[in-house]
Amino acid sequence: MIQKTIKESGNKILTDLITLDTPGKASVRVIILADPDEHEICFVDDEGFRQLSVPDYPSEAILDRFIQKEASATTDNA
């Protein structure tokens, strides 16, 4: 429906409405348009985007631990 409405209005679609699958996670529908100045505008469906953008705090803690470990190793070798 949105794609048809955009085409009928004469606006430019750079990437047709597609569904991007994320294995083990939510799929998200995306359409990319061009504004009059040829800038890209990406529209993403709200539900899928919200499911994919939930913070993963345990992973952040693991990443922080490895960054600190790497920083310590770098200063110890200097």
Image (cartoon, rainbow, N blue to C red):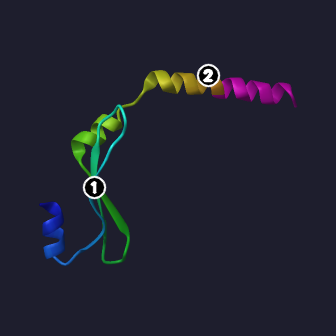
User: Which callout, 1 or 2, points at the residue further toward the start of the chain?
Assistant: 1
Q: In this view, does 77 lie to the left or right of 40?
A: right
Q: In this view, does 63 lie above or below 46?
A: above
Label 2 belongs to which residue?
65
Quarter of the image for residue 62 reads: top right
> Callout 2 environment at 10 Å: few (<14), some (14 to 19), or many (20+)?
few
Q: Position of residue 21 (x, y in %)?
A: 33, 43
The structure residue drawn at horizontal position 59% and vertical position 26%, both measured from the top left corner, is 64
Is 54 positioned to the left or the right of 72 in the image? left
Front in this rendered view, residue 69 or 30: 30
* Rendered-image quadrant of the C terminus: top right
Q: What's drawn in magenta, residue-wise?
A: 67-78
Query: Within 10 angstroms of label 1, few (less than 14), some, or many (20 or more) residues?
Result: few
Disc 2 is placed on an element classified as helix
Q: Where is residue 4 in the image (x, y as percent from the top left)?
A: 14, 67
Give the number of marks. Answer: 2
Q: Mark 1 points at which residue?
A: 18
Q: How far apart in space, not on screen, are marks 1 and 2 (Cα)?
A: 37 Å
- Residue drawn 13% across the image and 75% down it: 8
Residue for point 79% across, 30% down: 74
Q: Which residue is drawn at 32% across and 59% down?
A: 42
Is the magenta region chiefly helix, strand or loop?
Answer: helix
**Residue 20 at x, y = what percent?**
32, 48
Q: Is residue 55 above or below residue 5?
A: above
Which part of the image, by quadrant, shows the N terminus?
A: bottom left
